Image: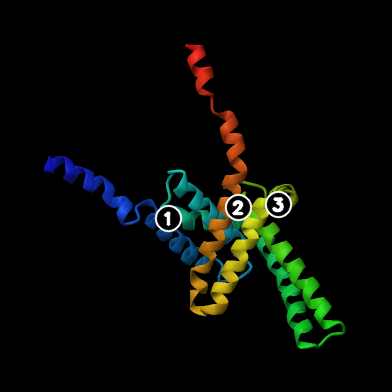
Amino acid sequence: MSRVSGAAARRREPEVFGGRRVAAFGETLVVGLAVTALALPLVTAAPALAAGARHLTNHVEGRSDTVGSLFRDGWRAIRTGWLFGLASAAVVGVLLLNVALGLAGLVPGGQALAIVSALLAAGVAVCVCRTAALWSPGADWRALWHQGRTLVITDPVGSAYVLSGLLVAAVVVWMLPPLVVISPGVLVVAMVSAERRRAEPTQRASRPSAGGSSSGR
């Protein structure tokens, strides 16, 4: 009797202490630190997010998710997507500069300019994140950009996930600036969640139904 109860306690132990939830939290921290390191030049931010999203997806789906593979994917993404990263960083940077100038009252119609620029910056950032979440080694960034822009419109719930991730990451950094090194992990979680939600109907449709498999026998 005691052996049975001891075995049951050991089986329950991962749930008591967090189990997969703790592992997922750890991966979020690892992804946040790695993406921060890869994105230090700023122009590599989009490829860094792409590598982080691929790593977290591999972790969730049970594929190889070593830190080494994360940085190898980061190098592949930067090598092929540096131009996309440069362009996206420049556009978002200009829009944020407009926000700062507008709020400071240094340009005519400052408040209106700040609001419009902030909305545009958020829209571009969501497009970039959705594009980065689609990346895999060998993918064409131009094609990914077209698909990512389309998803912003055709998958509004997923885009809301990503926008929420952006806002949460921004608030975390605003409240505790040192957490800038792990806040990208929050954004990557939102990106991967949006993609997995979008893929669920396709995955369910591709699985054979129980009735179909039994009738085949």
Instruction: Check the image and report above or below for 43 versus 68.
Output: below
Instruction: Check the image and report above or below for 99 versus 59.
Output: below
Question: In the current view of this chain or complex, which residue is farthest to the front?
Answer: 1
User: Which residue is label 3 attached to?
Assistant: 156
> Can you see residue 44?
no
Question: In the current view of this chain or complex, which residue is farthest to the right?
Answer: 108
Residue 133 shows which numbered tag? 2
CA distance for labels 3 and 1: 25 Å
Residue 24 shows which numbered tag? 1
Residue sitting at 52 percent across and 73 percent down?
180
The quadrant the N terminus occupies is top left
Question: In the current view of this chain or complex, which residue is farthest to the left?
Answer: 2
Residue 205, picture quadrant: top right
The percent position of residue 186, horizontal first and vertical second, equals 53, 63
Dot 1 crowding, Cα within 10 Å, few <14, some 14–19, many 20+: some
Dot 3 crowding, Cα within 10 Å, few <14, some 14–19, many 20+: few
